[in-house]
């Protein structure tokens, strides 16, 4: 969970605004982008995880007292909203209406993907997290590993893009006999799956490898309804689509045909022994060199796959602290449920409505 304002401030109708800045490399193009609407969304199983959408007035001053500025990029490659590598940093500023104390929470960095002049006096902008860079920057030739999981992750990252690792991840050598695909993002995801780890991006646009989530969450935040709470609604939903109860992880190396890990759900409503039936997911990687590694990958994949199966789509007062993978509890009366955040959708303006999160639970 990010740092930010305390629960009591968020529950008390605080002053809410977004600070957006535009950068091109190390050059600041705009210290303040005026917006009339905007949202940041994230989804754990989405390729680049996070996306940003903005509506900007065509003509507006970036700060009071300054001349009007044309926020339509046109053919200007150095315009703050152009698509030539411009990155938008997003922070949320929350101010208490009681004592005027303010908290600024950094949300993320997003690469401009496209813009559109809506011909109604506004410009629409779409951007995506910097995981788009390894997706787009494909390798120009076939490459084989030269070192460990960490060193390969750093080598496969696009030039100038940082990589960070959870200290709980234990590094190990990569087999030199395998070859990477030309898709950098696929290779980084394969490293994460085989480690096992979670491939994410941090608020500065750095590639992040997190340790797998535990089987049982310890909530870092409890959302409550009623007086002093921020919870608006928490209906339930459930889906069988794409949810396995058996995961088989094997090596992709022809020289190691017997390396295999099998994770199976044997209890609960999705048990292989019950009426749910058997739904198998198979996954293979040459990064798996022994049965222990294969078993760890299979068990982590099974937990990750089953987590969003039963989803609680929660509506709350906007909270900039919440991010993907946060363990959160929902308290409504005497009922308390808990799980991990698998998706979120947050407004950037005070009149943008509620924040929405999906809480993935396994029971």
Image (cartoon, grey):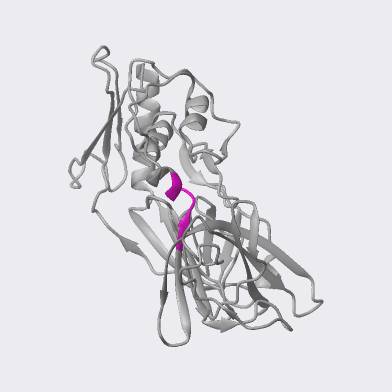
174 in the magenta segment = no
Q: Is residue 245 above or below residue 191?
A: below
Whole-percent x and y of residue 92? 64, 67
- Most foreground residue, 42 or 242: 42
Whole-percent x and y of residue 135? 39, 45
Whole-percent x and y of residue 103? 73, 65
Q: Is residue 82 above or below residue 324?
A: below
Q: Is residue 205 above or below residue 317?
A: above
Q: Tell me which residue sits at (48%, 54%) in the image.
A: 129
Answer with left or right where residue 338 lies relative to residue 136. right
Q: Tell me which residue sits at (56%, 56%) in the image.
A: 109
Outermost front residue: 75
Residue interval drawn in magenta: 127-133
- Most foreground residue, 10 or 221: 10
130 in the magenta segment = yes
Answer with left or right where residue 129 lies relative to residue 245. right
Q: Tell me which residue sits at (74%, 84%) in the image.
A: 65
Q: Is residue 98 above or below residue 163?
A: below
Outermost bottom residue: 120
Answer with left or right where residue 223 lies relative to residue 261. right
Outermost top residue: 255
Res. 138 image quadrant: top left
Q: Is residue 107 visible?
A: yes
Answer with left or right where residue 278 lies relative to residue 30. left
Q: Tell me which residue sits at (31%, 40%) in the image.
A: 267
- Most foreground residue, 102 or 249: 102
Outermost right residue: 99
Q: Is residue 215 visible?
A: no
């Amino acid at each position: 969970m990010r740092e930010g304002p305390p629960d009591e401030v968020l529950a008390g109708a605080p002053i809410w605004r977004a600070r957006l800045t535009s950068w091109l490399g190390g050059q600041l193009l705009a210290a303040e982008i005026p917006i009339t609407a905007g949202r940041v969304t994230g989804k754990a199983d989405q390729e680049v995880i996070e996306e940003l959408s903005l509506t900007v007035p065509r003509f507006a001053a970036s700060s009071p007292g300054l001349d009007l500025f044309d926020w339509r990029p046109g053919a200007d490659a150095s315009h703050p909203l152009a698509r030539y590598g411009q990155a938008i940093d997003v922070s949320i500023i929350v101010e208490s209406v009681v004592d005027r104390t303010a908290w600024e929470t950094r949300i993320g960095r997003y690469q401009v993907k496209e813009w559109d002049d809506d011909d109604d006096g506004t410009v629409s902008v779409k951007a995506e997290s910097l995981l788009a860079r390894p997706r787009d920057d494909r390798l120009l030739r076939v490459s084989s590993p030269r070192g460990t999981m960490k060193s390969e992750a750093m080598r496969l990252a696009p030039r100038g893009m940082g990589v960070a690792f959870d200290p709980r991840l234990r590094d190990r050598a990569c087999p030199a006999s395998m070859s990477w695909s030309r898709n950098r993002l696929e290779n980084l995801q394969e490293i994460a799956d085989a480690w096992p780890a979670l491939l994410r991006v941090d608020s500065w646009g750095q590639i992040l490898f997190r340790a797998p989530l535990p089987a049982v969450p310890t909530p870092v935040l409890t959302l409550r309804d009623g007086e002093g709470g921020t919870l608006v609604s928490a209906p339930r939903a459930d889906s069988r689509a794409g949810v396995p109860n058996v995961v088989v992880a094997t090596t992709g190396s022809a020289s190691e045909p017997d390396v295999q890990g099998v994770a199976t759900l044997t209890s609960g409503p999705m048990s292989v022994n019950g009426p749910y039936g058997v739904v198998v997911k198979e996954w293979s990687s040459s990064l798996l060199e022994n049965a222990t590694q294969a078993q760890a990958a299979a068990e982590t994949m099974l937990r990750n796959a089953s987590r969003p199966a039963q989803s609680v789509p929660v509506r709350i007062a906007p909270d900039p602290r919440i991010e993907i993978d946060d363990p959160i509890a929902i308290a409504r009366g005497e009922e308390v449920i808990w799980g991990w955040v698998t998706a979120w959708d947050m407004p950037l303006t005070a009149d943008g409505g509620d924040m929405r999160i999906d809480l993935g639970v396994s029971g």
